[in-house]
Amino acid sequence: MDEANNAADALEEPIQFSKGINLKELLNSNIEFCIDLDYKDTHKAMKADPLLNDDLFGVDDDDDVDSDILKTLEQTTEYGMLSSPEYHSFDELAVKMTDCIPTGECKMLVLEEGDPKNPLVPYDAEVTIHYAAYWEKEKIPFDSSLTMNFGKPQKHRLGDGRLIPGMEIALTLVRGPAARLLVLLEPALAWGARGVPPRIRAERALFVLTLYDVQDRTTPEQFNSLPKEEQKKYENIMKTVESLHAQAKKLFSKKKYKPARNNYQHSMLILNYANPENELQEENIKKFRINTYVNLAMCYCKLNKPNYAISMLENLDYVSDVDKHCKALFYYGKAYQLLGNNEEALKYYKKALTLEPRNKDIGKTLAELDEYLKKTAVKEKELWQNAFQSKPAKKESIVYDVEQEFENGVRKMCQDLTGRNEYAKFDLPTGFSRDEVLCIKSLIRDFEGLVLVENGEGKRKKMSIIRKLL
């Protein structure tokens, strides 16, 4: 009787664990857990995630709360493309599937697969997935990743024992990074031949898997463990370097510049092992060398080490003509700008713009640097005037009767023309007022290399802004 009362009391109040419970402990114990679906913070956590419906766990006054929860989970699985497919039995579904292993304990049907040119998912890759598990003829999953981690996709490292064996086998037989598949597993390749009673039955289960991303975790350590003859093989070198570059790109996007730099340095060391056997291999190795040097320069600029960036780009010049690479020229300019050598920076920015005249980022950088230099020149002049106690000439303040939007538009047009490195001509429309014409002439004087050409008189007067070559 006391035990029954204690059990009832335990369900009345929530119990806080002193430490977490891992999967192995959960599967090997006889403990059952009750989850309070009315827990006050649950609906807040679920509402914060866009994958889940805002009404999830939003309990009304209905008595049948569990049915509402199951209905919402069903809608969520459909949204995540993890809903159970239409079928009459596992046997009928199995006919459409292929065996992943000879015993037939793991069967698979690929619903959607990524680019067929992509390699198979490596056995030790890091995968990002969602899954839902169903018993036969049931529409509501008895297990789903959508109910964990606030509905976010899970990341798993294959081979570390966290995923059940059948799921790992199936994932290594598809081509990522995007895929959707059905996996039918016998108990032995799921939670074990006996299941985990009472929740996990000793029956076949259908898994609906959505693969979002694949990260090949091939490391330099793995490469170094290979025999020297294997290290020289083109395939092993390219696989390792591609993996390092993919990791570096992801790290850079997260502003982790030092680890990204380290990955690019490792890839350069591995490329030194390369012994290409034909022109195609030699060309691919060269492309990766160029890419590595440029990306190293980019990382060093972000780390505020411009001298190192310049050193990487000088090394690039031994591999290829740096003047043919817009990105390399741009980071040459960036490095010199960080060093305060704005004249050299301008030179390289203009070279980069010559290769890609429509590159807005380069044009914007040039315009900003040009504006900075003009302001610096004014400040420097004021400094010397103060040093010699010389008063600057008063500049007449001219006010034109024009709209601010008109003035801003003319200034922006002048900045765009100044950022170009070639002759350019822009014909202005006719019909400007006297103040608008005076405003245009005044603004053009602030931009070096721009002149206003006028033809005709009165309302028929035609005007053009010309970007002269300096």
Image (spheres, rainbow, N blue to C red):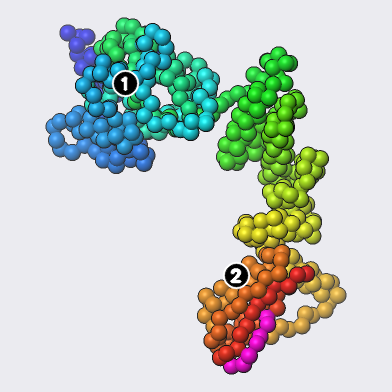
Question: At x 36% / y 23%, what residue is drawn?
Answer: 109
Q: Where residue 2 sits in the image (x, y, percent)?
A: 20, 9
Q: Residues within 10 Å of mark 1 (few under 14, many from 20)?
A: few
The quadrant in which residue 469 appears is: bottom right
The amino acid pointed to by label 2 is: Lys
Q: Where residue 227 sits in the image (x, y, percent)?
A: 71, 14
The quadrant in which residue 86 appears is: top left
Question: At x 65% / y 69%, what residue is drawn?
Answer: 417
Q: Secondary structure at mark 2?
A: helix
Q: Which residue is mark 2?
A: 412
| 416 shown above or below 214 | below
Question: At x 73% / y 16%, what residue is drawn?
Answer: 228
The amino acid pointed to by label 1 is: Lys
Question: At x 76% / y 28%, what residue is drawn?
Answer: 272
Residue 455 magenta = yes
Q: Judge left or right: residue 35 versus residue 149.
A: left
Q: Where residue 186 sits in the image (x, y, percent)?
A: 33, 11
| 324 shown above or below 464 | above
Q: Check the picture and name the quadrant holding the N terminus.
A: top left
Q: Secondary structure at mark 1?
A: loop
Image: magenta residue range: 452-458
Nearest the viewer among 392 and 296 is 296
Q: Which residue is mark 1?
A: 96
Q: Check the picture and name the quadrant holding the C terminus.
A: bottom right
Sequence-wise, which precedes: disc 2 or disc 1?
A: 1
Q: Residues within 10 Å of mark 2 (few under 14, many from 20)?
A: few
> Is residue 41 visible in the rendered structure shown here?
no
> Is residue 99 visible in the rendered structure shown here?
yes
The quadrant in which residue 443 appears is: bottom right
Q: Where residue 88 sits in the image (x, y, percent)?
A: 21, 21
